[in-house]
Each structure stands twice: as C-alpha cells, then as structure tokens.
Image (cartoon, rainbow, N blue to C red):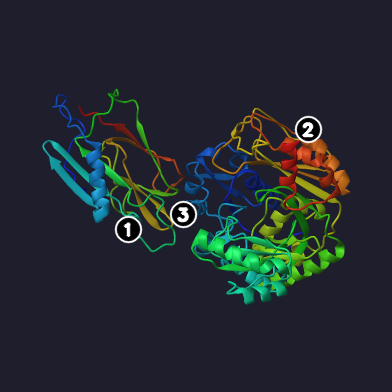
C-alpha cells in the first residue's frame, strides 16, 4: 500500500530529546491556509519539528471506484483535516498489553480488509500504524470509504471479518497505542 | 382485513424512525408476519423498538442529523440487512422527497406516496395551487401582490370581509393588518405597505381572507397504487399550542354526516386526480360559518392516527404496508363504519406550565388500562427520555360510545397514568378535560392560548 511516510518503528529509542513543542495556534493557521488555497497535503519542517497535514476531500478517495456521482453525500465531514505529527507526542505511559485503543466504524456498511479481493490486507497484526494509516475499507452505497487509524500504534487484532456488515461504532481493529518518549 | 393468499408482501422492512411510532410500525409488521430492522442512534440503544425488532443497526450518534436524518447511513443499513422496504414513520425523513428518490434508486420500496407527490405537497404554495386546481376549496386570496389601491379595492370586494393584508417579503406580524369592513381597506392598505417597506425593504402586500377562530379539521385518506383513494373521516385537532397539537379527537364535534360526505368526496376526487397513494392527511381550517379551506397536506402517517383507528376499526399502519406492497384498496379496506368517539392526548415530557422540555430518567411508569383505553409508547420505568428528540413520550387514546363518555374516560385515564422522574403535560390535559368550553366542543385554534391566559390571570 502506497504510504508516503517516513518509516518509523514503534519502538523508538527510550531516551530521546524532549519532543518538540507543538504550537496549536500555528497548526490552526496552517490548516486555514490549506483550506483557503484548496491544498490537500502540506509538509512543514522547522528545526526538529516536522509536521505533515493531509486534508481529505469530500467523497473519500476510493481505490476501487473513484467516487461515483451518487446522490448521497459522504458521511464524513468534508475537508476533515488530520494532523500527522512526527514524532508523535508521547501519550501517558501505558503498560504494554493493556489499554488497547479500539478503532470503530464511523459508518454503516460492509467491512473489507483489503483494497481488492486478491490484494493483501491493508494491515495485519503486528504492523505498526500512524494516525492516518488506512486500516480497511467500509463500503456503503457503492462508495469505498477508507477508514484510517486515529492513533498511532501496533495492530493487535482485526475485530471484524472481511465482508461482514458493520454498524456505526462497531469495533474494527484493536491497536496498542505506541509510547514514544 | 383478509389478505388474498397470492398477494405480494415485503420480505423485510426497515423502520427509519424511533420511539413510539417505530414501535407502532414494528407491531404492524409482526402482525403481518414481516421481519423488521430497527435503525437506532447511540441514545436509543436500549429502547423498546431495538429490543422488539428482529435486527437492529446502529446508524450514528445521538444527534438526529447524524443518525435518523442521515440518508446514507439509513440506506446503507437497509442494504446490509437486505430489506426491500423502508417505513419512514412521521417526522425525520418521512416527507423528504430526496429520501424517497434515493430509496427508489436503491430498489427499496418507500412506504408512502411518490417522491413527486411528496415534493408537491411539501411546498405550501404549490400544494395550495394544486389543491385548488384539483377542486378543493382554498383560502381565497389575491394570486400575487396587490399593485395599487384600485386593485386592493377590487380584491377586497371579491374576497369579502374580514380579510388580512400580509407582507409578501416577510412575516412576524409586520405589514399585517386585519380589515373588517370596506371603510378600513384603504387606510389599512397604505399602513401595511408602509410598515412592510420599513421592515423588509419591499412594500408589497397581498390579500387573503381572514379565517376567524378557525377549527383545525383534517381528513384521513388511504390510496392504493392502482388509482383509488378513500377517506376514513375527519379528526379535529384545534387544541394546539404554537401550532403543536396537544389533543385530537374523532369525529369532529363540528362536522355532521352530510358535510363529511360532501367534503370527503371532494378530497377523494382531488387525490385521485393527483395519483395519491399510501396514507395521508388533508388539513383544513373551518371558519365560524362552516366554510372549509384547504391549508396543507401531510403525506405520511400522523401522530394522531389512533383516533381514526379507534372509530373505524381500521389498522392504518398495516394498511399502509399492504397498499405499498401493491394490494388494492378494496381488498385492504373493504368497508368500515364510523362508530363512537375517540380522544387522544399527546403526553409530552414538558413542564405543564412553562412547556420547557423535561428530559431525564423515568423513575416510575404505569400506564392506565381498562375498557376503551389505548396507550402507544416506547417509554417504561427506568427508561431515559433523551434530550435530542421531540418531547412526545406517550399517546393516551380513549374510545367510548359518545363524546361525553370519552371525556369521562380520558379524565380517569389521565388520573391513573403514573409518570415520575420527568414533568409531563398530564396536569394541563386534565384541566382541559374539566373545562366547560372543551366539554361543549366549542373549539378553535386559539382555545388553548385563551385557557392558559385565563389561568394566568386567575
């Protein structure tokens, strides 16, 4: 799966310089800039702060069917921006094996673990994912909606079966949130 | 209502609604032997419709726009459960022509009339024009703006007094004048134009007949997909507060058999012309002299449908489903007789004096029973009335051989309805049952406001 990401393992060096402080006001300004200029992706480096922001156009890009002109609007808010921050801010320390983060389906539809029937699945247990990593597809009304990880972590378990109907809030994946100092 | 053995019936129905009407539809489906799918928001996860449906799909968070009004989620739920029909209930998507079209495009039957008819009746102006063209009486008025004083005089003569001058560019009472006689028309015309110009920048006014102390009287109709329509009598819904009905009854104390037959026939003829199918309600205002004027049509099952069911014996929701499945009207309702009198009180979770919504957990709930009492509700002890939706928590319907007996029955049923934990409109409805004017049947749409005003100054 094409991922234009700097590869990072989930096990970063335990000692590391203090994570760069993120100025949320600055992030907001950048988001506003992107929206105003219709930008979809923007990468920003300053010192040891590296930020990439990706804005999702309404309709949800599909790997199989580039969005049909269906009458229904995309259930996600159009132009929903996500911040992918590298390195991620360290969450409160969680002992490994507990406090799994469950990624739930935001829409009703059919769960597919791979982009197409003969392709390998997007992710499998053990994979490390970042915020924004595509985990699966939920198909609704012929639109293939990419479901992204909303947190960085390690995929522990796929909780829905390929081809299974899912409802709003249905658990799809269990992630072990990554703790990077 | 026997169903011919060969008649097509839906394989599975999705109910795109919540609360008492969702449960009502599930009841009809169960009796017809049709499996059901309930869609629900997270706020309704533990509700009775979810419990009693054969399948249930969560379609979103509590907010209606993210769940019950979210067309893609509802359609997607219909697809993954493989239903072939959707019943929209009332409110939410029930009169959304777009939704009816999306259902059609998805090869799912929409239990209601066609999208085109929904659209026509959804625009008040257009509905009135179509109704008039189809032969129904509408409120007389000028077709458009009144250009000058000559035109005003002519229109006033034609329409008759009392009449109302209304600003075409806005509402809220500004640019509005009630005119009771020819001597007042020109000064009122000038004043209304001046006021409208000041308030909206456009002085244009139009003229409409003023219906004084109107009674809200509506006709229940059913239509099949083969061009036949019938009516099942009228309901009186004049006890309203801010255009929200609080008490409804059938038949109307102001309607006798001959009016029912003649107006009913005109309604049927008009709707057959329009190609109406499904359940619907045609609403009229009746003035003090007995003239009826069409105001609008609701292309869905209504909250107060049980009072019609009580006096006709016809199950309107089962009828909707069977008619949508293609059965003929003559098979679904071969005959009915109007018998007795029925009254409904909408029990809302509201302060009975301030009408502020009163959501929360119901700590005690005991519905009254006995002969001639029906309660439609999805509430129960320990249930939570969510703040996200309308405040209706139960419908209390009584039936009795006569209106006075129905009032007596309603009075005792209201007294025996225990709902604790939230405030309800029951105390107000008990006062209305005791009110001499209500008991005389002397009703009009200002009745409740007057009663509340009297109470304030008491």
Rendered location of residue A4, percent (x, y): 19, 48
Residue at the spot 27% in from the left edge and 28% down from the top edge: A91
State whether discs 3 and 1 lie on one chain. Answer: no
Rendered location of residue A156, percent (x, y): 32, 34
User: Would residue A110 be seen by someone viewing this image from the given angle?
Assistant: yes
On the image, which quarter does residue A160 sit in? top left
Q: Secondary structure at mark 1?
A: loop
User: Would residue B121 be seen by someone viewing this image from the given angle?
Assistant: no
Q: Which residue is mark 3?
A: B72
Q: CA distance from mark 3 to mark 1?
A: 19 Å
State whether discs 1 and 2 lie on one chain. Answer: no
On the image, which quarter does residue A26 sit in? top left
Q: Residues within 10 Å of mark 2 (few under 14, many from 20)?
A: few
Pointer 3 indicates a residue of which chain?
B
Q: Residues within 10 Å of mark 3 (few under 14, many from 20)?
A: many
Q: Nearer the viewer, residue B382 or B259?
A: B259
| Mark toward the start of the polypeptide (3 vs 2) | 3
Instruction: Single out the mark in the foreground, 3 or 2.
Output: 2
**Are dots 3 and 1 in contact, CB under 8 Å?**
no
Q: Which residue is mark 2?
A: B416
Count of labels shown?
A: 3
């Amino acid at each position: 799966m094409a991922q234009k990401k700097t590869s990072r393992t989930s096990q970063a060096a335990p000692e590391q310089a203090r994570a760069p402080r993120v100025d949320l006001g600055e992030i907001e300004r950048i988001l506003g800039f992107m929206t105003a200029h219709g930008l979809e992706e923007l990468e920003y480096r300053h010192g040891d702060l590296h930020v990439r922001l990706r804005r999702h156009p309404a309709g949800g890009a599909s790997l199989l069917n580039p969005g049909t002109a269906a009458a229904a609007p995309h259930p996600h808010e159009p132009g929903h921006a996500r911040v992918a921050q590298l390195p991620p801010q360290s969450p409160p320390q969680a002992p490994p094996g507990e406090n799994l983060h469950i990624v739930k389906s935001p829409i009703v539809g059919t769960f597919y673990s791979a982009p197409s029937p003969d392709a390998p699945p997007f992710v499998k247990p053990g994979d490390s994912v970042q915020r924004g990593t595509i985990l699966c597809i939920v198909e609704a009304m012929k639109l293939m909606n990419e479901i992204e990880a909303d947190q960085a972590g390690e995929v522990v378990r796929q909780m829905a079966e390929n081809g299974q109907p899912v409802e709003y809030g249905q658990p799809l994946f269990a992630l072990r949130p990554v703790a990077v100092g | 209502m026997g169903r011919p053995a060969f008649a097509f019936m839906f394989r599975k129905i999705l109910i795109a609604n919540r609360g008492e009407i969702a449960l009502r539809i599930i009841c009809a489906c169960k009796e017809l032997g049709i499996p059901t799918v309930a869609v629900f928001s997270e706020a309704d996860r533990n509700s009775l419709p979810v419990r009693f449906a054969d399948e249930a799909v969560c379609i979103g968070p509590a907010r209606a726009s993210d769940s019950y009004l979210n067309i893609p989620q509802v359609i997607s739920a219909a697809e993954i459960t493989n239903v072939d029909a959707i019943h929209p209930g009332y409110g939410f998507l029930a009169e959304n022509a777009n939704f009816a079209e999306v259902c059609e495009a998805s090869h799912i039957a929409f239990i209601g009339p066609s999208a085109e008819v929904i659209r026509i009746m959804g625009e008040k102006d257009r509905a009135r024009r179509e109704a008039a063209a189809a032969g129904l009486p509408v409120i007389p008025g000028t077709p458009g703006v009144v250009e000058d004083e000559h035109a005003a005089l002519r229109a006033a003569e034609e329409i008759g007094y009392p009449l109302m001058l209304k600003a075409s560019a806005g509402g809220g009472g500004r640019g509005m004048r009630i005119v009771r006689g020819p001597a007042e028309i020109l000064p009122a015309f000038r004043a209304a134009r001046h006021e409208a110009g000041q308030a909206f920048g456009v002085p244009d006014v139009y003229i409409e007949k003023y219906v004084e102390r109107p009674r809200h009287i509506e006709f229940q109709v059913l239509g099949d997909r083969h061009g036949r329509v019938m009516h099942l009598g009228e309901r009186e819904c004049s006890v309203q507060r801010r255009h929200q009905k609080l008490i409804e009854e059938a038949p109307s104390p102001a309607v006798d058999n001959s009016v029912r037959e003649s107006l009913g026939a005109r309604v049927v003829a008009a709707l057959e012309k329009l190609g109406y199918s499904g359940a619907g309600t045609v609403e009229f205002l009746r003035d003090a002299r007995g003239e009826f004027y069409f105001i609008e049509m609701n292309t869905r099952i209504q909250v107060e449908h049980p009072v019609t069911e009580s006096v006709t014996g016809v199950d309107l929701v089962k009828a909707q489903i069977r008619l949508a499945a293609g059965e003929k009207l003559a098979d679904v309702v071969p005959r009915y007789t109007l018998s007795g009198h029925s009254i409904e009180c909408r029990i809302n979770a509201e302060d009975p004096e301030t009408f502020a919504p009163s959501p929360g957990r119901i700590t005690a709930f005991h519905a009254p029973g006995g002969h001639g009492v029906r309660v439609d509700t999805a509430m129960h002890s320990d249930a939570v009335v969510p703040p996200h939706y309308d405040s209706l928590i139960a419908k209390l319907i009584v039936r009795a051989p006569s209106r006075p007996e129905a009032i007596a029955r309603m009075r005792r049923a209201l007294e025996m309805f225990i709902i604790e934990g939230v405030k309800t409109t029951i105390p107000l409805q008990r006062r209305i049952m005791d009110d001499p004017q209500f008991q005389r049947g002397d009703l009009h749409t200002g009745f409740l406001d007057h009663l509340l005003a009297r109470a304030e100054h008491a």
